[in-house]
Image (cartoon, rainbow, N blue to C red):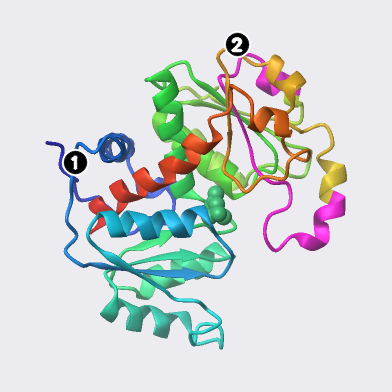
Amino acid sequence: MLKPNKLANNNFLSSLDLSTDEVFHILDLAINFKNKKISVDLNNKVLGLIFDKSSTRTRVSFQVAMSRLGGTTIDLNPTTSQIGRGEPIKDTARVLSRYCDVIAIRTFEHSNLEEYAKWSTKPVINALTDLEHPCQALADFLTIYEEFLDFKDVVLTFIGDGNNVANSLILCGALLGVEVRIACPKGYEPDALIIKRANEIYKDKNLLKITDDPYKAVSGANVLYTDVWSSMGEENFKEKKDKDFKGFTIDKELLGNASKNAIVLHCLPAYRSKEITDEVIEGERSRIFDQAENRLHVQQALLSCLL
Ligand code: CP
């Protein structure tokens, strides 16, 4: 029976904390968890959840993952703990390390996550920052693998804001050698350092493409992926972003320009008729709810490797 291997890095802050082999190992484990071919007992280990922003999928999938692994979770709500009062991260991280075995954090600035990791003596997991969403990317590539059974010749086109989700797709795509195209309006390109790091990893230097033409980007693509145009905390920019992203909706017409076997992904929650139409979400090419389910299986795999 497949067994979880220890990861080289103690933390999972970025897709780049994993090697290519480790990504494949986590996907392999996740498939085994999904098919109930593996069982791991974490013997009452405790995952602390610090969420500075709302969450349904990430929070619940971590809670259920720990429960299935024989562990438990503590919800460290910033408003009812001293975190919301402004207790320094270095103090919180050292104290929580004495109680918890692993901590998953959703916050705004990536540097805050790094500060937790610096002071924590237990593994820290990125549950979403402004820079990356690496747990999401693992579930996304598991969904792609389930569909195509291989990453060879897969073309993944992300249409939307080149922020955290796009950044992690780029990095994980580079590790797996998948062609990643990002279609975003000018000014919404992915982080320059992420692009540089991905290009250093890709063996084929033509596999990462950034364009402001969604039709060009979906031509021949096997996976069309989008995310909300205005993330949590960007409510004041909503009107401007709705204007800037006009023409970047995944609708039936855009999907019709992709490969015939193309699937559609969205990390959810979605705004129907903004970044994607209801018809496409509910359509036969959508794998969006399999993708959401896969959050659970990859998180079981990740936790069993970190603990
Ligand atoms: N995709 C995702 O991270 O969903 P939640 O915000 O519900 O966790």
Q: Camera-side residue: 170 or 241? A: 241
- Kind of residue at disc 1: Ile
Q: Position of 218 compared to 82: left or right?
A: right
Q: In the rendered structure, which segment of residues is drawn in magenta?
A: 215-240
Mark 1 to mark 2: distance in Å? Answer: 35 Å
Q: Point out the image quarter for the C terminus.
A: bottom left
Q: Who is closer to the viewer here, 73 or 222?
A: 73
Quick one: label 1, few (<14), some, or many (20+) residues within 10 Å?
some
Q: Front-most of 111 and 249?
A: 249
Q: Which label sits on residue 38?
A: 1
Residue sitting farthest toward the top? 260
Question: Going 49% across and 20% down the picture, which residue do you hit?
Answer: 154
Image quadrant occupied by the N terminus? top left
Residue at 88% from the left image edge and 44% from the top image edge: 243
Would you call the spot at circle 2 few (<14 residues within 10 Å), some (14-19), or many (20 or more)?
Answer: few
- Residue 106 appears at what percent x and percent y? 51, 64
Looking at the image, is 284 positioned above or below residue 103?
Answer: above
Give the secondary structure at mark 2: loop
